[in-house]
């Protein structure tokens, strides 16, 4: 009896934020990172995916281990079928996401055709919400401290440096 290997369909590659690196022609550019994830989705082999984009397997793992590669690592895990883990996003991370946008590899019929970059509107809105909240806290801290003494102030002062003496 003959056994035929049926190719598994490639998993959908989620959009991710590329790892910020120095610009090098032979390095991990955002396009090369996106194409790597696309090839990883097709082959499910880190060695084959790295070879397809002209990089070494070791450098792919080194890129994944970087402190600022959380989005890249989450996309890598999603491609291989692991559960993503939520992490708190800091303000510098949001700024980077707004500046660089999202990258998504384009995979059709098992072939990686390239990558598409688009704006990250969710990061932009999250950044605006944080700015609005910070402004509201600053306004609340300044509000009413001109006329109230420390004993009259019922709520704890949000900014102790601005409290009346």
Image (cartoon, rainbow, N blue to C red):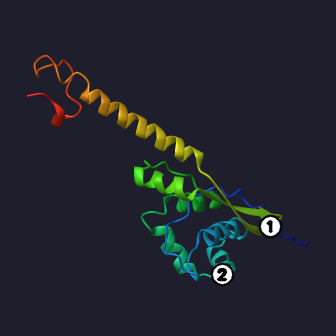
Residues 133 and 1: in front is 133
Q: Residues within 10 Å of mark 1 (few under 14, many from 20)?
A: some
Residue 43 pos. (x, y %):
71, 70
Locate residue 13 relative to residue 124 in the image: left or right: right
Residue 54 pos. (x, y %):
65, 82
Residue pictured at 48% horizontal, 75% vertical: 22
Residue 101 pos. (x, y %):
58, 56
In space, the residues marked 1 and 2 are separated at their CA atoms by: 16 Å
| Residue 49 vertical placement versus 96 (above, below) | below
Residue 18 pos. (x, y %):
56, 63
Residues 97 and 83: in front is 97
Q: Earlier in the sequence, mark 1 or mark 2?
A: 2
Residues 148 and 124: in front is 148
Task: Name the element at disc 2.
Answer: helix
| Residue 135 vertical placement versus 96 (above, below) | above
Locate residue 41 relative to residue 87 in the image: left or right: right
Residue pictured at 53% horizontal, 56% vertical: 99
What label does residue 154 carry, if any?
none
Task: Name the element at disc 1.
Answer: loop
Quadrant of the image for the C terminus?
top left
| Residue 152 vertical placement versus 19 (above, below) | above
Q: Residues within 10 Å of mark 2 (few under 14, many from 20)?
A: some
Residue underneath mark 2: 51
Residue pictured at 18% horizontal, 18% vertical: 154
What label does residue 110 carry, if any?
1
| Residue 165 vertical placement versus 70 (above, below) | above
Q: Are marks 1 and 2 in contact (CB under 8 Å)?
A: no
Locate residue 78 relative to residue 111 in the image: left or right: left
* In the image, farthest residue toward the front: 146
Quadrant of the image for the N terminus?
bottom right
Locate residue 158 relative to residue 129 in the image: left or right: left
């Amino acid at each position: 009896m003959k056994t035929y290997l049926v190719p598994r369909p490639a998993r959908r590659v989620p959009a991710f934020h590329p790892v910020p690196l120095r610009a090098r022609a032979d390095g991990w550019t955002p396009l090369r990172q996106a194409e790597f994830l696309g090839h990883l989705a097709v082959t499910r082999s880190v060695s084959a995916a790295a070879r397809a984009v002209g990089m070494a397997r070791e450098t792919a793992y080194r890129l994944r281990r970087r402190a600022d590669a959380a989005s890249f690592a989450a996309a890598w895990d999603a491609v291989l079928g692991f559960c993503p883990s939520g992490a708190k996003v800091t303000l510098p991370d949001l700024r980077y996401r707004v500046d660089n946008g999202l990258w998504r590899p384009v995979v059709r019929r098992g072939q990686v055709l390239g990558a598409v970059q688009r704006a990250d509107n969710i990061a932009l809105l999250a950044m605006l919400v944080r700015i609005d909240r910070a402004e509201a806290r600053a306004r609340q801290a300044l509000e009413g401290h001109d006329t109230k003494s420390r004993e009259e102030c019922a709520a704890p002062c949000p900014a102790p440096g601005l409290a009346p003496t």
